[in-house]
Amino acid sequence: MFSNQVIAMSASKPSLSTRERAIPYAARGALGGASIEHYLHAASALERDHMVREGFEPGSLDAFAHRFGRSGRSLAQLLGVAPATYDRRVREGKPLSQDDSDRVARLIDVERAATRVFGDEAAAREWLGAPIPALGGAIPIELLVTTPGHQAVMNALRRIMAGTAA
């Protein structure tokens, strides 16, 4: 009888679209799109996923980029967003694409991992912007444009944490 009650209750609930389920997580910024500040404090991976799918609003990228001594436009370009695309999205009040937002999310996740490894955000950002021998002399932040590059940076951080990286 209990299982029949569960079936009856679930049948009476209206079905929500993916877009409707994402609304509580949207945390829209001033120009439309998800706020990176909200992403930084999201309670779950699912909430962060919804924000990336929504797209980050360019204004929040500008605020986040200052942590790296950059403008939002230059950080976006470093992460593979064409300057004209970034400018158009700012001008039109549109969020970054899902792919562009995903690259920003990779940077956020790598910065967090590097902060755990090095003990503070300044040291993490310094490491992210310097050539790293364990990465063939590449600069970690520049590798975040691709998934394999992101994986290489995360693997380097894991090796440092384990004490096996030079």
Image: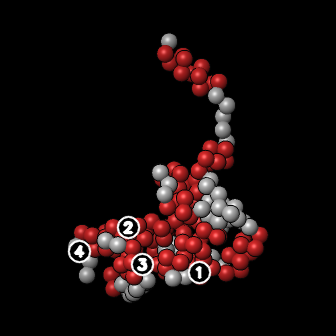
How crowded is the residue under tag 1: few (<14 C-alpha within 10 Å), some, or many (20+)? some
Please, what secondary structure does the residue beneath circle 3 have? helix
Residue that protrudes farthest toward the right in the picture: 92
Tag 3: amino acid: Arg
Whether residue 32 can be seen here: yes
Q: Which mark is residue 18?
A: none
- Amino acid on which the number 2 mark rests in the picture: Ala
Identify the residue at horizontal 36%, vertical 70% (top origin): 115
Residues tagged 4 and 3 counted as in contact (Cβ below 8 A)? no
Q: Distance between the residues labelled 3 and 2?
A: 11 Å
Percent x, y for residue 91?
76, 73
Residue of label 1: 71
**Separation of residues labelled 2 and 4 (CA atoms):** 17 Å
Mark closest to the chain's N terminus, 4 or 3: 3
Closer to the eye: label 1 or 2: 1
Residue position for label 3: 125
Q: How far across and how far down the image is residue 93, in percent?
A: 74, 67
Which residue is under mark 4? 164
Residue 78 visible within the image: no
Label 2 belongs to which residue? Answer: 113
User: What amino acid does circle 4 point to?
Assistant: Thr
Q: In this view, does 51 lie to the left or right of 90?
A: left
Callout 2: 10 Å neighbours few (<14), some, many (20+)? some
Q: Percent from the top left, x then y, of residue 42?
A: 50, 54
User: Looking at the image, which is closer to me, 143 or 56?
Assistant: 56
Which amino acid, by three-letter code, is at mark 1? Ser
Q: Residue at x 33, y 67 (%)?
A: 116
- Answer whether labels 1 and 4 touch (C-beta < 8 Å): no
Q: Residues within 10 Å of mark 4 (few under 14, many from 20)?
A: few
Asked which quadrant contains residue 62, the reply is bottom right
